[in-house]
Image (cartoon, grey):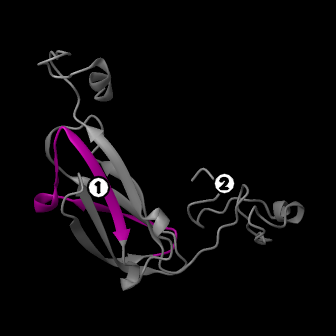
Amino acid sequence: YNDGHLMDACNRKGSPIGSFYVPTDIDNQTRSVTEPFVGADEPVSAADNIMARLMTSPTMPITVGSSNLSVYVKNVGSNTVTSFNVAYTNNAGTPVVQSWTGTLAPCTDTLITFSGAQQITLGASNAIKVYTYSPNGNTDADPTNDTISVLYKAPLSGLYTIGAGGNYPTFQAAAADL
């Protein structure tokens, strides 16, 4: 986020003295006296809140073809999560869904990998969307942190021509693929 708000209520690192001098945050919420957050925001943790934290594969430069897709899912809620779904789409295609069960304590994460028949098939241009939903079978408390969206393009290699009948009609079109 670029509005001064934190993405989750984990990793408190503030000093207790800070809340004495700055008792409220930018939203006028009372800061913790014993363990405030560093910065301008004191986030409130809600139950059943997971986030897609980081997609670790595929990475650039991509290789066209089948590839594992891996994403860290973090429990940023106040309660333990025992089940959730994570899915991805490529170029707005059919969602590929994986259901997870286990124990995910607050402020911890787990790596989910789509492999085998669930691998992503990468082409020349890939608008990949990875998202989480249904923590503990419930509606996620904060859906704004559930999605990672990336655009990956295969690297260019070889000779290309620009102009009528070429690979690119204009220099601008060629530059857009760089």
- Measured as percent of width and height from the top left, residue 66 is found at 13, 48
**Mark 1 highlights which residue?**
70
Mark 1 closeness class: few <14, some 14–19, many ≥20 residues within 10 Å: some
> Total number of numbered labels?
2
Dot 1 amino acid type: Ser
- Measured as percent of width and height from the top left, residue 34 is found at 77, 70
Q: Residue at x 83, y 65 (%)?
A: 19
Is 132 on the left-hand or right-hand side of 43? left
Position above or below: 164 against 53: above
Position above or below: 172 against 137: above
Position above or below: 95 against 120: below
Dot 2 amino acid type: Gly
Label number found at residue 54 = none
Depth check, front residue: 114 or 178 = 178
Q: Residue at x 24, y 45 (%)?
A: 126
Q: Residue at x 61, y 59 (%)?
A: 6
**Which mark is first along the chain, 2 or 1?**
2
| Main SS, magenta residues | strand
Depth check, front residue: 151 or 76 = 151
Residue 55 falls inside the magenta stretch? no
- The secondary structure type at the circle numbered 2 is loop
Q: Quadrant of the C terminus?
A: top left
- The secondary structure type at the circle numbered 1 is strand
Q: Residue at x 78, y 68 (%)?
A: 28
- Measured as percent of width and height from the top left, residue 70 is found at 29, 55
Range shown magenta: 105-132
Is 142 on the left-hand or right-hand side of 29? left
Is 97 on the left-hand or right-hand side of 106? left
**Mark 2 highlights which residue?**
4
